[in-house]
Image (cartoon, rainbow, N blue to C red):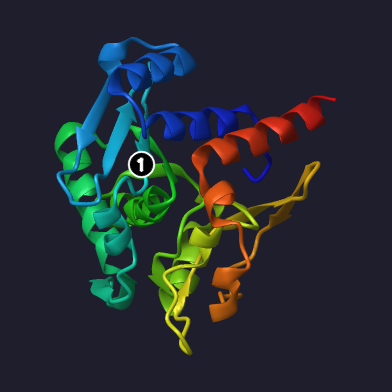
């Protein structure tokens, strides 16, 4: 974990197709996993955010879950919720962004109904789907007893309080990879003025960009650095958050590695 490779390219491409036509999504995912289309399932969560996710069960005992980010204005309002959902886990109080937690819990229940616990689970999400993925990984492994092999996010917002993020980082650090472009505003929210009490966790894969190229930096520490109010106005929100821009950045970096 922690180095860009062809799996990152596959994952962000599938996340991009999640925003489009379902027929194209099935075709592209089937090709990338070299598996039959009947081993893919697209689920609409039935939530105002327009959340939907794809599950892929290639041959063997692995399960892949891809979660789409916000698809409409109601979703933007939903993602901007700043209050937290408090839960208890083994006597510890944990606090998550309430909207993301609600979606993650719904998907976790679906997975528990449709998939056996002998499958190793890999979860991927872009934007709000990445925040949901981080919480889902916790719910499936720590709450329902599944083996979560990896959680990978692209341009995800923060999903947990600082104390919760610190605890999750200790428990799940080696399984969570957070890929982000430094100009992506969404990675700086939800933001609470003067408090800033949300944080990321996991392994950071930070992609810097300029007008001509990209460079990548790997960090493996809990991210205690939080957004300031002024950060929200410095960044290139439209370009740097779009999934297609992540596709282009990762494609460029992989080409550089191949030389």
- In the image, what residue occupies the spot 51% across and 35% down? 12
- In the rendered image, residue 240, in percent from the top left (x then y), is placed at 59, 50
- In the rendered image, residue 220, in percent from the top left (x then y), is placed at 66, 59
- In the rendered image, residue 162, in percent from the top left (x then y), is placed at 46, 77
- In the image, what residue occupies the spot 31% across and 44% down? 146
The residue lying toward the viewer, choosing from 183 and 62, is 183
Residue 118 shows up from this direction = no
Which secondary structure, mark 1? loop
Whether 6 is drawn above or below 174: the answer is above
Whether 120 is drawn above or below 206: the answer is above
Q: Quadrant of the C terminus?
A: top right
Residue 107 shows up from this direction = yes
Q: Is residue 154 left or right of residue 29?
A: right
Task: Choose top left, top right, bottom left or bottom right for residue 120.
Answer: top left
Q: Quadrant of the N terminus?
A: top right
Which residue is at the far bottom? 194
Q: Is residue 179 left or right of residue 20?
A: right
Q: Which residue is mark 1?
A: 68
- In the image, what residue occupies the spot 48% across and 17% down? 32
Task: Choose top left, top right, bottom left or bottom right for residue 38.
Answer: top left
């Amino acid at each position: 974990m922690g180095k860009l490779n062809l799996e990152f390219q596959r994952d962000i491409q599938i996340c991009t197709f999640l925003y489009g036509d379902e027929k194209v999504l099935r075709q592209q995912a089937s090709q990338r996993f070299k598996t039959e289309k009947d081993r893919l399932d697209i689920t609409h969560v039935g939530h105002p955010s327009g959340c939907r996710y794809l599950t892929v069960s290639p041959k063997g005992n692995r399960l892949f879950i891809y979660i789409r980010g916000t698809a409409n204005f109601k979703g933007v309002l939903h993602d901007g919720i700043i209050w937290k959902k408090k839960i208890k886990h083994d006597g510890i109080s944990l606090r998550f962004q309430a909207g993301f937690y609600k979606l993650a819990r719904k998907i976790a229940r679906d997975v528990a109904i449709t998939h056996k616990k002998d499958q190793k689970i890999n979860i991927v999400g872009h934007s709000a789907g990445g925040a949901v993925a981080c919480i889902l990984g916790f719910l499936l492994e720590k709450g329902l007893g599944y083996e979560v092999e990896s959680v990978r996010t692209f341009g995800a917002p923060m999903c947990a309080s600082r104390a919760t993020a610190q605890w999750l980082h200790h428990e799940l650090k080696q399984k969570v990879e957070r890929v982000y472009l430094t100009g992506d505003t969404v990675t700086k929210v939800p933001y609470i003025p003067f408090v800033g009490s949300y944080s990321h966790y996991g392994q950071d894969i930070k992609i810097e960009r300029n007008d001509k190229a990209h460079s990548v930096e790997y960090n493996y520490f809990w991210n205690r650095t939080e957004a300031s109010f002024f950060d929200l106005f410095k960044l290139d929100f439209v370009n740097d958050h779009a999934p297609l821009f992540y596709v282009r950045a990762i494609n460029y970096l992989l080409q550089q590695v191949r030389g």
